[in-house]
Amino acid sequence: MMMALVKGAASLSAALLLLGGCAATTVDAYRGQKPTLDLRTYFDGTVDAWGIFQDRSGKVVKRFQVRIEASWDGDTGTLDEHFQYSDGSTSRRVWTITRIGEHSYTGTASDVVGTARGEAFGNALRWQYVLELDVDGKSYEVDFDDWMYLIDERVMLNRSVMSKFGITLGEVTLSFIKRPREG
């Protein structure tokens, strides 16, 4: 009887450890990390980025470069993104970002369904939104879960998971480099 209780407790402990390992990280976990990410400071001026899109098998199916012209008027920012893809195609997205609290942001763009929501703590930002993607003449609404990490005053890394109905479709990885101000 005692052995059965010990085995049962061990099984329960193992299950709880596994469940704890599956718990999602919150952006608040980065509260003490430096340097502190302030979107108004980082996305002010020109930022260049290079990225890849990987399908769910991990295969890189598209490479791209982005030039972002960013400016702020108080707590409202404009990020004008110009994409150049490895297949020669181009696109543009213009974000309007609003700081709505000490750690909170919202954003809109023409191909974003509804409003994007973001939280920033320490050196990290979690940005979540639904993007309308055109694929082979069809339009799909895809969930994006972006995590951005400020490395230093010029470099930021971004990892995005794209999903639909909770199923991962692929990942986007970006490296941002802020251009120094001239003058």
Image: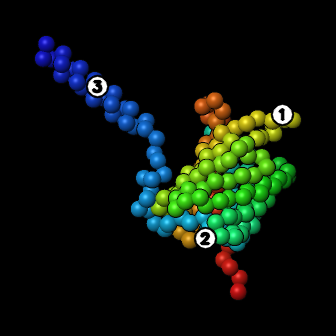
Q: Position of residue 161 (x, y in %)?
A: 61, 42
Label 3's element? helix
Res 157 seen here: no
The image quarter in which residue 96 lies: bottom right
- Against 115, is 177 above or below? below
C-alpha distance separating marks 2 and 3: 48 Å
Q: Position of residue 80 (x, y in %)?
A: 76, 61
Amino acid identity at mark 1? Lys
- Against 96, is 130 above or below? above
- Against 94, is 182 above or below? below
Residue that badge 1 annotates: 138
Which of disc 2 and disc 1 is earlier in sequence? 2
Discs 1/2, front: 2
Q: Nearer the viewer, residue 95 or 50?
A: 95
Label 1's element? strand
Q: Which mark is residue 12?
A: 3
Amino acid identity at mark 3? Leu
Specify the quadrant that holds the C terminus.
Answer: bottom right
Q: Position of residue 126 (x, y in %)?
A: 56, 51
Q: Position of residue 68 (x, y in %)?
A: 73, 64
C-alpha distance separating marks 3 and 1: 47 Å
Tell whether 15 sits left or right of 105. left
Amino acid identity at mark 2? Thr
Instruction: Mark 1 and mark 2 in contact? Answer it, CB < 8 Å.
Output: no
Q: Which mark is residue 112?
A: none
Residue that badge 2 annotates: 41
Instruction: Rate crowding at label 2 as few (under 14), some (14 to 19) or many (20 or more) other CA atoms within 10 Å.
Output: few
Please tell me which residue is depicted at 54% across the width and 64% down the height of the picture. Answer: 37
Res 146 seen here: yes
